[in-house]
Amino acid sequence: MSYDFPKATSHLPSAAKDDLIVIAGAGGFIAGALVAYFKEKGFSRIRAVDKKPVQQWYRVTRGVENLCLDLSEEPNCRRAAEGAVELYNLAADMGGMGFIETHRIDCLRSILINTHLVEAAYMAGARRYFYASSACAYNTDLQKSPDVVALKESDAYPAMAERGYGWEKLVSEMFCQEYWAERSMPTFIARFHNVYGPHGTWDGGREKAPAAIARKVIEAKLSKSNAIEIWGDGTQTRSFMYIDDCVKGIDMITHCDALVATPINLGSSELIAINHLVDIAEGIGGVKLARSYKLDAPKGVAGRNSDNTFIKKTLGWEPSTTFTEGLTKTYRWIETQVADRAAGKRTVE
């Protein structure tokens, strides 16, 4: 099953450097990096919104309007969207597989955010609306082997998304597409594939595999336990996208008129097995650890990779940071966080 949505027949206007950009979920990892990205590009009016108190945000950028609002409530979405020329919705209750598999209701309730926010953006006259979807929207029947065939955009249908989080993403994509088809508000949709990097979640249950493994290796070195526990049997495969590639991709996708109302993969095509991820982290840390496997732990699908044919054809670009390069930077940052926590300093977790 597929749907054909109208294409843009004329150039769609974008925000000028002094127009208001609104970024939802800005207290989180990816949206916090996106705020910094647009600030560095010279945008002078940025409104950052998150439900957490500002002092708990992962990253705060100077010179930005910061609002603490729960965007699952409709009046707060109207306040957040006031005057917005472009709005980026990265707000969601989510985390790594350990969170997604055990908090399906929380993940599903994120549909309230996009439902209210896309309407608020339309009522505010926004010129472009970006929605952060996920590779969890893809049909799970195609992800039963570690030697998975890379997923192309059409593989979301026939629909069999991951329970909870994946279905919320797929339905929210439809909202965005229909706001373009029926109300002519330009919407843009990227399906993220496992974003990681410095300033991301690294402890507490919401972290994803690269940060979790890096932290475990660091802790094993410090404790001299020389052992690491791995969720699953280690054969699971994923592609992992470094944060710098992610924010650049969001910008490029949102400002490509050919991609209006068109879901597109945003991820690396470098497939990494969890056991190999551990190998790389051990190499960075200069240690070799005894491995044990927690076979009953949440582990998600057996394999998932990003087919980047469409993004390369459309944008002439794809995420290019190698996993070893990105994990090295992430590992070193987590080392500083572990040291800061041991010293009693506030850390991002």
Image (cartoon, rainbow, N blue to C red):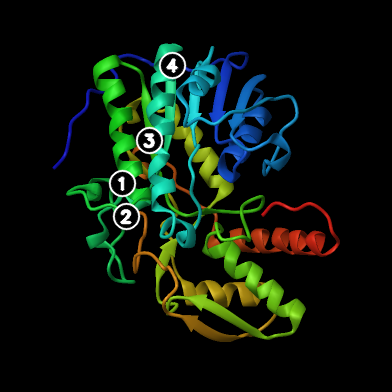
Q: CA distance from mark 2 to mark 3?
A: 18 Å
Residue wearing tag 3: 189
Q: CA distance from mark 3 to mark 4?
A: 15 Å
Q: Amino acid at mark 1?
A: Trp
Q: Secondary structure at mark 3?
A: strand
Disc with the residue nearer the chain's start (4 vs 2): 4
Q: Tell me, for residue 167, which label it has, or none.
A: 1
Left or right of 48? Residue 209 is: left
Whether pointer 4 and pointer 2 mark residues with C-beta atoms closer than 8 Å, the reply is no
Q: Secondary structure at mark 2?
A: loop
Q: Secondary structure at mark 4?
A: loop
Residue 185, percent from left and from top: 35, 18
Residue wearing tag 2: 162
Q: CA distance from mark 3 to mark 1?
A: 15 Å
Left or right of 341? Residue 130 is: left
The residue carrying pointer 3 sits among few (fewer than 14), some (14 to 19) or many (20 or more) residues within 10 Å by Cα, namely many
Foreground tag (4 vs 2): 2
Whether pointer 1 and pointer 2 mark residues with C-beta atoms closer than 8 Å, the reply is yes
What quarter of the picture does the C terminus occupy? bottom right
Q: Residue farthest to the left?
A: 1
Residue 218, percent from left and from top: 70, 72
Q: Amino acid at mark 2?
A: Glu
Residue wearing tag 4: 127
Q: Tell me, for residue 308, which label it has, or none.
A: none
Q: CA distance from mark 1 to mark 2?
A: 6 Å
Q: Amino acid at mark 3?
A: Ile
What quarter of the picture does the N terminus occupy? top left
Residue 310 seen in the figure: no
